[in-house]
Every structure is written in C-alpha cells, then in structure tokens.
Image (tube, rainbow, N blue to C red):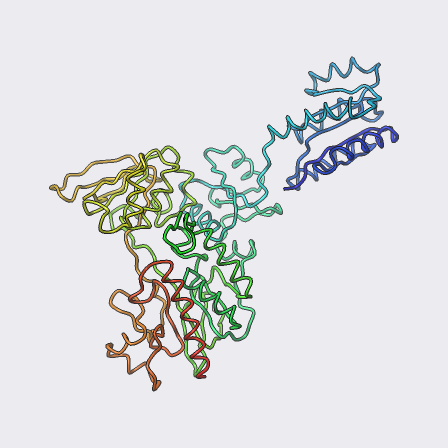
Amino acid sequence: MKLPYIIAVDDDQQVLESVTRDLRSEYGEKYRIISTTDPQEALDALGDIKNKKETVALFVADQRMPEMDGVEFLGKALKKFPEARRVLLTAYSDTEAAIKAINDVQLDYYFVKPWDPPEEKLYPVLEGLLADWQATHTQEFEGIKVIGYQFSPRSHEIKNFLASNLIPYQWLDMQSHKAAGELQEEYECSEQDLPLIIFEDGSALCNPDLQELARKIGLQLNASESLYDVVIIGAGPAGLAAAVYGGSEGLRTLVVEKHSPGGQAGSSSRIENYLGFPRGVSGAELTRRALSQVSRFGVEILAPQEVKDVEIKGNYKLITLSDETVVKTRSIIIATGVNYRKLKVDGLNGFNGAGIYYGGSMAEAPMCRQKNIFIVGGGNSAGQAAMYLSQYARKVVILIRKENLGSSMSRYLIDQIEGTPNIEVWGNTEVEGALGEEKLEGLKLVNNQEDRHWTEEEVGALFIFIGAKPCTHWLPFNIITNKKGYIETGRDLVRYPDYSKFWKLKREPYLLETCGAGIFAAGDVRAGAMNRVASAVGEGAMAIKFVHQYLAEN
C-alpha cells in the first residue's frame, strides 16, 4: 500500500523548514512529507497525486501568503481531496480569519506560531486528526477495475476469466455503483462497448477479447522455445502435476491451457478430502500453490491458448494452436479434463451468464446476497457450491432427480448440508422452464413423481452441476476414444479394431499412453479415471515417468 501524503505550504522558508522537520521526525515512517513555499506548486502537485491513485491525509497551510492565503489554498485543495484533514498556521493577529475558516473550509484546527515544544503543542493534535482520517478513509482499490452490468454474459466471462487466473479485480456495477457511470464517461466507453476494464496504470480496454486481456495482464501466449521435450495440454490438477514433475526433472516443459489454470477443481470453494489439508483447501488456493511450483521449475504456461490439431512427423509432434502458430515437441500429455454438461431445457440457454452459471463460478457469489439461489446437481461439486453460497444467499435450494443425496454425494458433505439452516434439498425435482426477460427471474419446477405437476419459484441465480463430458472434440482422428468421448489408453486399446491401424511399435502402449506413440492422457479426460483431485495429480506425475521411458527409446 502506498503511503499517504502530508503537504505543508508556507512562504516563509524558515517556518517551512521547521514544520517540515517536525512532521518528518514524528510521521516520516507512515506518511510521505512534501513541502513548498509556493501554494500554486502544491495545487499542481495534487493533480499528479490524484492521477497516480494516491491520497493526501493532511494539509498544513500558512494563512499569510501573498499570492494565495491559506484559507483560499485549502478551499482549492479540498476539491481534489475532500477527506483530507486541514490545519492552518496563523499569527496571533490572524485568529479571526482562522475562526472564520472553520466554516468556510471546514477547518479542523489552527496553530498560533510558534508551537514549541511540538511534543506538547503540535503532535497530540495532529495525532488525533490523522487517527480520525485513518478511521474514515477508504483506500482506493489499486488493481484492475471492471465496469459493466451484473447480468451481462460478457461481464460474467471477463470476471470469471480474471478470477480463474487469480487476478484481483474490483467489480463496479453500472446500476448500483455511482463511480461506474463516472468512469464510463471519463473513458468514453459506450454502453454497447461494456464491460470496461481499467488497469492500475490508468489505461483501459472496452470489451476486449480474452487474448487481448491476457496480454495486458502479462499472461504468456506464445512459446519461447523451438522444441520441447513434453507439451502438456490442459492445466487442471493432472496437467499442473505433470508440469511440476516434468520441470523438476529437467524436461523442457510447456503447458497449453484453453482458459485458465486449475480446471474444474480450481473453481471449487473447498476441497476437504485432499491429502495434507485437514481443514480443506479452496480450489483457488490449491491452484495458486501449484502455479508457484510450476514457475519455480521454469515451466512455461500459455493461456488462454487452444490446441486445434496435432500432427505426428516421425518422432516429433507438431501442435497447431488457435492463432495458427505451431509448437514442436517430442511428447504430449493430454490433460484437458471435462466440462459440465448443459441442462437441456427450453429457454435456459438465453440466460447463460445472466443468472444461469455452469460450475462453481465463485466470482458471482457476492451478487447472491439475500437472494434465493438454486443448484441443480447432487454430486460433490454441487454440495461444495451450496456450502459456499449459503454464506451469501438467503436460501440455497439443491434440486435433484432422486429422492435424496445418499447415492451421489460424499457423507461429510451431506452432514454439512443437513447442518446448515438455509440449505434445502428438494428431491424428485427437475427444471422444466425459465422465466425472465433480460435476466433469469424464476424457474418452472416439476415433481417427477407426480403427474406433470409444476410450480413457479422466484430465483436470484441458478448454478448447474449435472455431470461432465470430456474435452476431446479437438483430438486428431488417430486418438481412440470410447463411446462417451473419453481417451482410451494402455491395454484397453487392444479391443478396438482401429488399434492395429494406428499402433505400429513392437511393444504394447504404456499404461497412460494413447494409440499415438509418445502421446499420453492423464486425469478426468482418460477413460477409467477416478474423477478425484488426488488421482488426477497422481496420474499427472505418473505420465512423466512414461514420458521419460518414451524419450529414452527415441
């Protein structure tokens, strides 16, 4: 946090030196002290301080200055920093002007010169004024500001991207925050071009695409090496674990991530069954720790960057990215994980990002305050989200097709939910329709045990967790997947007719190897995976072992 300023102005150089010395002696460690004999110079400096998003805690001004008296100076200074405390330095004959200034510029105190000793006559007063200022001053947020409409899908995408990449930001809603409209006008960003993103250096972007935003916040989008030992596609728990082990064991390692590191686990409010965290750990914290390790071992991460195709040429693999650049590598680990399935109900898609959210979307939790929030899904992800959102919402309702959560959710979560007064579980209940105009306002619910009986419920937001599908739509044709799209590996490949067409080596595929030699799969994207963070991390580490074996062969 930048230190606030104390500004002293007096045209008498000797007096100015004295007050500056006293101020620095007592407050120099907690405040920046600047002084000048020219009041106009001080006013000019205030503009620069304001532009740098810094603040002034205290003005100390002499009343008798020929170009501009102290009261006039304080009146002008207050237009820039109205919260700053105000002190006037006067001679005995100026006390009448000082008393008048109490009303004119809300003067906090005036000192009759001289004030020796300062320990008795100066510091006790200033200490009280500065304490008052500290108690009422709200430090302006110094990071990224996002200005837009709460139920704008585009605003949701930007907020979710920043949150997923662990980038702090301040959200200013156009409909409820006065400063939002002022900033929109200041940066001349039309409503059609919202959201507006303002950066710490004062620059701004109107409705940027994610890659443009990524460049601005310093994310890496292009590979720096001409050849890698291993490229990991996906930065969830499996991909990050593989990156840590690959980097720590000296492999030239690159990670390519479509959206942001962490995967589905990264959006979890709390993971309570991961080894080594007896009190649980949030997905964001686990991701942050993993990224620190990855960075420590010199691994590159490209994000957001998407893989379009993979081509095998001899012992090398050529990966084509979404911007048409090509990355050359000796081996690949596919760790793209899964996406939540869409709820197929008429009218629902129109509210995606405008009241309907897939996955945890913890960036939207603050807008749930004192609202009725509904969750569709009975797995652990739904339970974790319910526990987190219950801290904000008036009521959280979990909707499940079955009668209860017993067959789909871990017991520890069921116990927590049953012990939380504002969480309800509605069994045998499904969503049949959505209500609202520009945003979701209500749901039509049906009891699947009755004859099409339905009710309408007012709803602040709907979060959906209804199973997953693998992120394998981009795979080249010669990577075998099962009927659900999960990647087959190891000995399970033998039962597929196309296996012999693609696999030409004398040895069998390694345990995590696909039908493309040197291309491995780890984590939830792999057929037969356990769908747990711990198992994904284990498979990511194990995949590096097989990469070493493959590289030794070639």
Depth check: 166 or 424 in front? 424
Q: Position of residue 240 (x, y in %)?
A: 45, 62
Depth check: 190 or 386 in front? 386
Residue sitting at 51 percent across and 44 percent down?
A: 146
Residue sitting at 61 percent across and 31 percent down?
A: 137
Depth check: 247 or 315 in front? 247
Q: Position of residue 270 (x, y in %)?
A: 39, 48
Single out the residue that lies furthest toward the left: 451
On the image, which quarter does residue 318 sit in?
Answer: bottom left
* The N terminus: image quadrant: top right
Residue sitting at 32 percent across and 37 percent down?
A: 420
Q: Position of residue 350 (x, y in %)?
A: 32, 46
Q: Position of residue 245 (x, y in %)?
A: 48, 68
Q: In the image, is residue 441 above or below residue 251?
A: above
Q: In the image, is residue 428 above or below residue 294?
A: above
Left/right placement of residue 92 relative to residue 288 reads right
Residue sitting at 76 percent across and 20 percent down?
A: 110
Single out the residue that lies furthest toward the top: 96
Single out the residue that lies furthest toward the bottom: 506
